[in-house]
Image: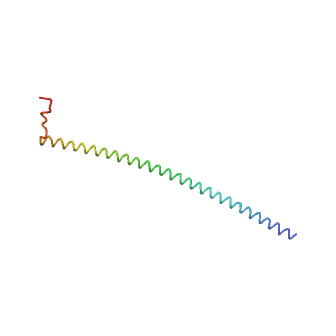
Amino acid sequence: MENEGKASKSEIAMRRCAKAALLLCRLKSLHKTTHEETQKRTIYELKIQLLKERSKNNKIKLCALFELFVRLLLLLSVWTFFFLIFVKAFGVCDWDRYSTYY
């Protein structure tokens, strides 16, 4: 009887250990999936952030190109202005000869 009591106690202990091992295994796999989901979420957020940065860089490039165009236009206008002043001051061209109003 005593032998049967020890056997049943050891059997109960083995079952408890098996249940504990099974629960630990499930908990570990749950932790892995949670960790994987966290990594996937982090990767997704980083991709979104990367797309926002690319969009921002494209806008900056577009603004820089527009600024360059405006500066070139301004420079051309200033050169034309000074060229006309130079021509009128030194009389390089005779404007009356080309005038249609006599």
Residue 36 falls left or right of residue 47:
right
- Percent of width and height locating residue 52: 46, 49
Residue at x 41% of width, y 49% of height: 57
Residue 91, placed above or below residue 35: above
Image quadrant occupied by the C terminus: top left
Q: Nearer the viewer, residue 22 or 97?
A: 97
Residue 10 falls left or right of residue 33:
right
Residue 34, placed above or below residue 79: below
Residue at x 85% of width, y 70% of height: 3
Q: How many callouts does the rendering have?
A: 0
Residue at x 59% of width, y 56% of height: 36
- Percent of width and height locating residue 17: 74, 64
Residue 37 falls left or right of residue 73:
right
Image quadrant occupied by the N terminus: bottom right
- Res. 37 image quadrant: bottom right
Is the image coloured rainbow, by chain, by secondary structure, or in one colour?
A: rainbow
Farthest residue to the right: give it.
1
- Percent of width and height locating residue 67: 32, 46
Q: Nearer the viewer, residue 19 or 90?
A: 90
- Percent of width and height locating residue 51: 47, 49
- Res. 87 image quadrant: top left
Residue at x 74% of width, y 63% of height: 18
Residue 19 falls left or right of residue 2:
left
